[in-house]
Image (tube, rainbow, N blue to C red):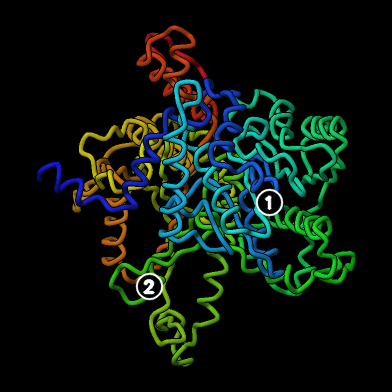
Amino acid sequence: MDQGSQKASVTPYEEVLDALSSLITKRSRADPSIKGDRFDLLFDYIKILDLEEPISKLKIIHVAGTKGKGSTCTFTEAILRNCGFHTGLFTSPHLIDIRERFRLDGVDICEEKFLAYFWWCYDRLKENTNDDVPMPTFFRFITLLAFKIFTAEQVDVAILEVGLGGRFDSTNVVQAPIVCGISSLGYDHMEILGNTIGEIAGEKAGIFKHGVPAFTVSQPDEAMRVLEEKASQLDVHLQVVPPLDANLLNGTKLGLEGEHQYLNAGLAVVLCSTWLQRTGHLEVTNLQQNSSLPEQFIKGLSTASLQGRAQIVPDRHIDIERSGDLVFYLDGAHSPESMEVCARWFSLAIKEDSQQQTLNYQPQDDARTSNELIQRDSGGRSRKNSTQILLFNCMSVRDPQLLLPRLLKTCASHGVHFKKALLVPNISVYHKVGSHALSSTDSQVDLSWQFTIQRVWENLMQGNKGVDAQSMDAVCEEVKDDTELCVKNCANSAVFSSLPIAIKWLRDYVQQNQSIRFQLLHLRWVISKTWNPTFLSRLCDISLSWYEDFYSFLVEAMIALNRNSELSFGSVKFDC
């Protein structure tokens, strides 16, 4: 195929994604070199785009935090939309399509509008930037694009989720929001935000503006002290919000699953209430009543949706008896604490699913013994036993020993045990937006980290079964896989070269076992870069291969400490 035909095959939308990709200049927004990174440039970009006055007229709700800020923003948007307002919501990251980051009235911006606004911004910036004022980086550009979209569409309210930190985040060009919120704080992006919870809180509090009311949830003592100090310096009235009382929902459920969402919902309710009061919409609600929330608030909270966060998706792409025979449970848990929360949600969700199957089960002949009865659903088909499978999409080198035990322990406490873990590399790359430039498989993909995680998983599973330390070396013996889709198949886990291949294997497995209902927990987790071997090898002036070996040794050491066993690193032996 010649270059001309190749260019013709690229769609207008793919051209935009390629242009966006050209703005990705660093591997991560958490690159230490972007600290501050000439924050003042954002005001130059705003002038170039003639957005100064339009942004000043936006009625903005600004939300920062470590955990829950995206959910809080989603609840907030849904509530105000149901109150009759024209809403704009800017969140990150996106799950599938970049347009998910820009929502108008609860719906992703349409492709036609996205293309028009994108090129309007991109062309003007390209024409007016230079060596002193270079093109904005990826996240800065999409933030500017969000401002253009929301001002051009004349939204009544713009809800902005901070991307990273707060003080130097590109959303923080906002000078006078209506109200600010800080969701739960924790340790994340420490190489940028600081090594203590207090330092992190200080960066998040950077969104506070003089005299603008702010709300937060219960925080660690050190973090709360810093938030209060920053608020006092700016004459900000900071209030702590309790979790939402479920009784106020009049029997309905939150649209986002999980007990932790009541904390985010409580914050969203006060952000909306304050926004309504400060923008002169007192006629909408009276939130002083204690019996229940206003109808618009309840509808917003119960219909809010956010892809990939405690989301349940039945697979409808396999030709089997029922689409519910393979169900995906999706979440983005990325810390030990959130793994526990996710495990509780998953365990309770599949228990609820099992109870629903039992309610639908109607025996056909009460005279038969229980062993003879064929369990059937209300449609007359066999009621199936359930099997739980875990699917990991590992972004980069992380410490699974901090995560997997919390997941397994919490699930086990609810009687849930995984039959298998499927381990896959990430299908995306940091320097490309969209999947049009990516192949579904790559024979050269590096799976060394997946093999490391497989060993940890197998050791944990064998430990749960009471296998002694002498058997550890044999734990990862390969098991024959007739499908030839697995790169390495062990008793409790399998490594695949890509996510699509893992899904194909799974669907084929479901086809061959139609008496079983498969419930798959898919976790895409990202932890702090404390264990990045490339970074630490440079820091300590040691070889990368030595550090990778040492990291594997430390993982084994943590396991051995729980076994009272012996292990060695090089020629040195350790008695654990």
Residue drawn 61% across the image and 27% down it: 40
Q: Closer to the camera, 396 or 518? A: 396
Label located before the other in sequence (2 or 1): 1
Does any portion of residue 398 appear in the rendered image? no
- Image vertical order of residue 42 relative to residue 89, above or below: above
Residue drawn 86% across the image and 68% down it: 286
- Image vertical order of residue 55 relative to residue 251, above or below: above
Q: Which residue is mark 2?
A: 323
Kindly identify the amino acid type of the residue bearing the numbered disc 2: Ser
* Number of marks drawn: 2
Q: Which mark is residue 58?
A: 1
Residue drawn 30% across the image and 68% down it: 318
Residue drawn 79% across the image and 62% down it: 245
Kindly identify the amino acid type of the residue bearing the numbered disc 1: Leu
Q: Secondary structure at mark 1?
A: loop
Q: Residue 308: x, y in percent?
A: 50, 54
Q: Closer to the camera, 33 or 336? A: 33
